[in-house]
Amino acid sequence: MKKCIFLIAACVLFSICDAQERKVNVPESDNRLSEEVITVVADKYEHDFGKISETGGIVNYEFKIKNTGSEPLVITKVTTSCGCTVPDWTKEPVAAGKNGFVKVTFDPKGRVGDMTKTLVVYTNGNPESVRLKIKGSVE
């Protein structure tokens, strides 16, 4: 009896999972993603500080964020993976074809060893979020 109940539950679970993975075909005329007007491109997605002195003080890097679309780009927020990493960014809308920035400040004090930190940049564009990384080795 237990095997029968288990088999039925497994079949139901499989059916639910299979149904969730099916894609709905959207006609070309209804596909609003083809009408993208704001696109986000970073000059690079990862910066390597190399060797950083723990006592050398704070280090900074500025990523350039380009609006390759036709409407203004707004960076709504930037989050970081660690409190030792502080972001700053362009607060005003970035016009089409122009550049904004995401500046990251890293404090190496008390963080000896290899480090990799992630920043997530949230925008009104496509994609809605962009991942940037910094890395280095604190000595």
Image (cartoon, rainbow, N blue to C red):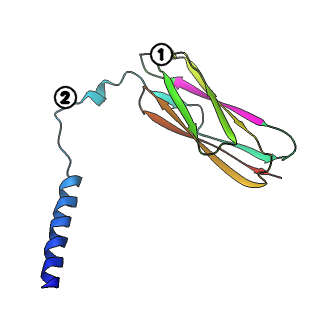
- On screen, residue 89 versus residue 68, left or right, reads right
Q: What is the CA distance from the residue labelled 2 to the residue labelled 1? A: 25 Å
The foreground one among 116 and 40 is 116
In the rendered structure, which disc, 2 or 1, sits on the residue that comes first in sequence? Answer: 2
Q: Is residue 102 visible in the rendered structure shown here?
A: no
Q: Which residue is mark 2?
A: 30
- In the rendered structure, which segment of residues is drawn in magenta? 59-66
Residue located at (17% from left, 55% from top): 19
Residue 37 rendering spot, x and y as whole percentages:
37, 21
Disc 1 secondary structure class: loop
Disc 1 marks which residue?
A: 96
Q: Residue at x 64, y 28 (%)?
A: 88
> Where does the N terminus fall, quadrant-wise?
bottom left
Does 98 appear above or below 6?
A: above
**80, above or below 101, in the image:** below
The percent position of residue 20, horizontal first and vertical second, equals: 22, 53
